[in-house]
Amino acid sequence: MFQALRLICAFIFLAAVVCSLPRPTSAQQKPKLRPLNIALANHSVTMTGIYVAKQLGIFESYGFDARVLVLEPRAAIAAMLTGDLEFYTAIGSTARAALRGVPVRVGLVALNRPDFMLVASKEISNIEQLRGKVIGGYVAQGTVNVVLAELLRRKGLRPEDYKVVNAGTARAAALASGNVPAALVNSVETVRLMKQGFHVLARAADELEIPQSGLGFPLASLQTKRDVLRSGVQAVLEAIRVIVTQKDKTVAVLTKQLALAQEEAGYVYDGMKSGWALDGKPTPAAMKLEFELDQRDMGLKEPPRPEQVYDFSLLEESGKR
C-alpha cells in the first residue's frame, strides 16, 4: 500500500514537472494580428494581389488580419479620409481624387494593363454599331468610364456618338438582362457572358497601357500609420511576385476566390500576366497615358505631375530593408 502511494506521488510530481516545461513554439499562442482594412472596387482578376496575399497567408506573415470589402470610389475615398480604411485598390479613382485636391496618394501600382473588355449582345457585331446606343459604364471620371471613352476614341467613336449609363458594379447583369446592348466589363464577367452568347468587341489590354490597380492611401496615415502602410505595401508586392512566378498557386486562388473553373481561371490569368508591375510602379507609357487622359477628362490646363498623384516613399523604404 505504501509503495503504491509512493508511485502515485512520483507520477503526480513528474506530471507537474512536464506541465511546467516550456511548450514548443508551434503550440504557443500566435501573436495577435493587427486589422488591415482594404477596399476593392470590385471582385476581378485585377485584385489578384490582394487575394493571393490573403489566401496564401502573406498578410498574416506581416502580422495582419486583412479585412477586405467592396466599395464604390466615393465611399472608399471618404472612408480613407476618416481613417476607417488603410488602402483602396482603385488607383485610377484615387489618382483623380488627388488631382482634385483630396489628400490621398497612390503608393503602389499592381497592374499596367486594364482588365476590361467591351462586350456586346449578339445583335451587335462591331463597334461602329454602337453609335446612338447606350453603354453600361460606372461613375463619372471613374476608371471604367475613362478607359471606355479612350477605347472607343481609338476605335473611331466620339463621346457624342453614344451614351454611358452608370450601371455600377452590375454592368454584366445589365447587359445579360438586356438593359444595355453593350458594357465594359472585366475578364471574369466576360468569361461568363460568353457562355450566354455575348461576344467581345474589343480588349482594352490590347489597346491601352495604363495603371489599373494597386494601393491608394490617405496622406494623413503616412504620419500616423507609416509602419502599417509600409508592411501592407511589402505584402502586396510579395504577392505580385508570387502571381508572376507561380501560375498554379495563383490559378488555385482565382478558382476559389472568383468561383471559376480551372480553365476559366487559367484564361483570365494568361490575359493579365504581362501587365503585373514587379517593381510596384507604373511604366513610363502607362503613366504618360494616365496623365493625358486625366488632363483631358478633368479639363486640366497642363498634365499632372507625378508627385500630385504618386508617393512611392513606402516602396523605396521597403527596398532598403
Image (cartoon, rainbow, N blue to C red):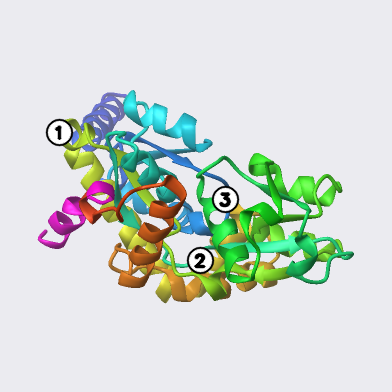
Which residue is under mark 3?
145
Nearer-the-camera pick, 159 or 177? 159
Above or below residue 160? Residue 204 is below
Q: Residues within 10 Å of mark 3 (few under 14, many from 20)?
A: some
> Would residue 49 be found to the left or right of residue 200 on screen?
left
Give the side of residue 200 with respect to residue 30, left or right.
right
Q: Earlier in the sequence, mark 1 or mark 3?
A: 3
**Whole-Å distance between the Cαs marked 1 and 3?**
33 Å
Q: Quadrant of residue 191?
A: bottom right
Q: Is residue 24 visible?
A: no
Residue marked by disc 1: 223
Q: What is the magenta segment's predominant secondary structure?
A: helix
Kind of residue at badge 3:
Asn
**Residue 250, numbered circle:** 2
Task: Please provide percent x and percent y for residue 244.
Answer: 42, 73
Taking the image as drawn, is residue 185 in sight? Answer: yes
User: Which region of the structure is painted magenta?
Assistant: 308-321
Distance between the Cα atoms at labels 2 and 3?
29 Å
Percent x, y of residue 35: 35, 33
For the residue marked with disc 2, what is the amino acid? Thr
The image position of residue 157, as x and y in percent, is 65, 64
Residue at point 33%, 70% (across, down)? 283
Instruction: Please tell me in which quadrant of the rendered image residue 129 appears.
Output: bottom right
Looking at this view, name the residue that lies furthest to the left: 320
On residue 246, which mark appears?
Answer: none
| Identity of the residue furthest to the right in this view | 123
Membership of 162 in magenta stretch:
no
Choose the circle earlier in sequence order: 1 or 2. Answer: 1
Residue at the (77%, 46%) spot, across then down? 173
Question: Callout 1: helix, strand or loop?
Answer: helix
**Which tag is nearer the camera, tag 1 or tag 3?**
3
Local SS, label 3: helix
